């Protein structure tokens, strides 16, 4: 069973990495596309909204397909969207992110349903946790690696994510059996929202992801210390009776550093 779940976890890992790492690349994207960082930040907003809205819609439209075919379609859309984003030179990047979000939303839902269908009833909880663990691993591993790779060029990171998605496509096509589930309409998928317990769980999940995205750097601008006025400490106050200045220097990688004066 583990061999069948691994490619599903890899697919969710690719989605998680793509979702988280783009925030840290915003300053580089803004500079490359010659727009402001807040304007480039709309890539994150649009991606999240499209992913949330399109997931149940696309899930209903593809519910008649077996899970392997639906997942291969979703991953193909996801990989194509990342490739178009990496190739973009203007605001066509926004369109590419919309395409990517549609594929990403499908991947999470289809991978979850496939994991539940593959595993025996007694192990469905573990199987679902294992597959969705790819999202958690993306936070701990995919995000820092993506930021490291993208230090020279943000496009390289998106090509790497597209490469991970391509590996998942090949792996799923070769190792995942056809899984057929009963078709469900959009109304069937939204009906659980009428249950209070479901809404409570969604509220908790929303708060968790709100904290996650809030802690993710949406503006990875280097921290710069400003020179202090003579005989004053900055940014904190000095011990009584002591004063000093805070000289600023620049390191080779563009980050500004300073020497903390005595008494501050």
Image (cartoon, helix red, strand yellow):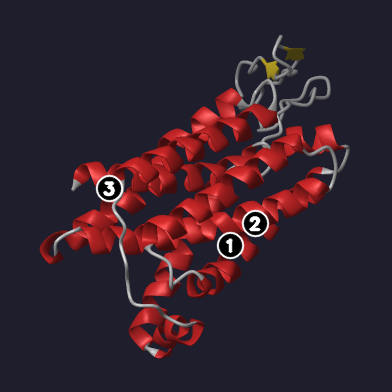
Residue 44 appears anywhere in the view: no
Question: Who's the residue at 48% across and 47% down the image?
Answer: 16
Q: Nearer the viewer, mark 3 or mark 1?
A: 3
Residue at image position (60%, 20%) is 263
Please identify the quadrant where the C terminus is shown.
Answer: top right
Calculate the distance from the C-alpha at mark 2 to the C-alpha at mark 3.
26 Å
- Residue under pointer 1: 51
Nearer to me, 28 or 185: 185
Locate residue 220 relative to residue 174 in the image: left or right. right
Q: Position of residue 46 (x, y in %)?
A: 69, 59
Q: Are marks 3 and 1 in contact (CB under 8 Å)?
A: no
For the residues marked 3 and 1, what is the alpha-carbon distance in whole angstroms? 23 Å
- Residue assigned mark 3: 5
Tell me what residue is drawn at x 65 percent, y 23 percent: 151
Q: Residues within 10 Å of mark 1 (few under 14, many from 20)?
A: many
* Residue that badge 2 annotates: 47
Seen in the picture, residue 3 relative to 227 is either above or below; the reply is: below
Left or right, 221 with respect to 187, comes to right
């Amino acid at each position: 069973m583990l061999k069948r779940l691994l490619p599903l976890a890899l697919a969710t890992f690719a989605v998680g990495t793509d979702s988280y790492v783009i925030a840290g690349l915003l300053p580089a994207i803004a500079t490359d596309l010659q727009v402001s960082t807040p304007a480039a930040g709309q890539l994150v907003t649009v991606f999240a909204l499209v992913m949330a809205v399109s997931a149940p819609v696309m899930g209903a439209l593809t519910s008649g397909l077996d899970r392997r075919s639906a997942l291969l379609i979703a991953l193909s859309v996801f990989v194509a969207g990342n490739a178009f984003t990496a190739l973009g030179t203007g605001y066509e990047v926004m369109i590419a992110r919309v395409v990517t979000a549609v594929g990403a939303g499908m991947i999470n839902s289809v991978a979850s349903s496939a994991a539940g269908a593959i595993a025996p009833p007694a192990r469905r909880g573990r199987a679902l946790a294992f597959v969705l663990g790819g999202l958690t691993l993306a936070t701990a591993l995919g995000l820092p690696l993506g930021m490291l790779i993208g230090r020279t060029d943000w496009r390289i990171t998106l090509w790497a994510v597209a490469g991970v998605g391509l590996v998942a496509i090949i792996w799923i096509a070769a190792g995942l059996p056809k899984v057929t589930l009963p078709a469900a309409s959009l109304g069937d998928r939204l009906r659980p929202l009428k249950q209070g317990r479901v809404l409570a769980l969604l509220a908790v999940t929303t708060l968790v992801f709100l904290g996650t995205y809030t802690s993710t750097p949406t503006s990875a601008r280097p921290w710069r210390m400003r020179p202090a006025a003579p005989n004053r400490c900055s940014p904190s106050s000095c011990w009584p009776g002591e004063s000093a200045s805070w000289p600023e220097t620049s390191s080779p990688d563009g980050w500004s550093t300073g020497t903390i004066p005595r008494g501050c």
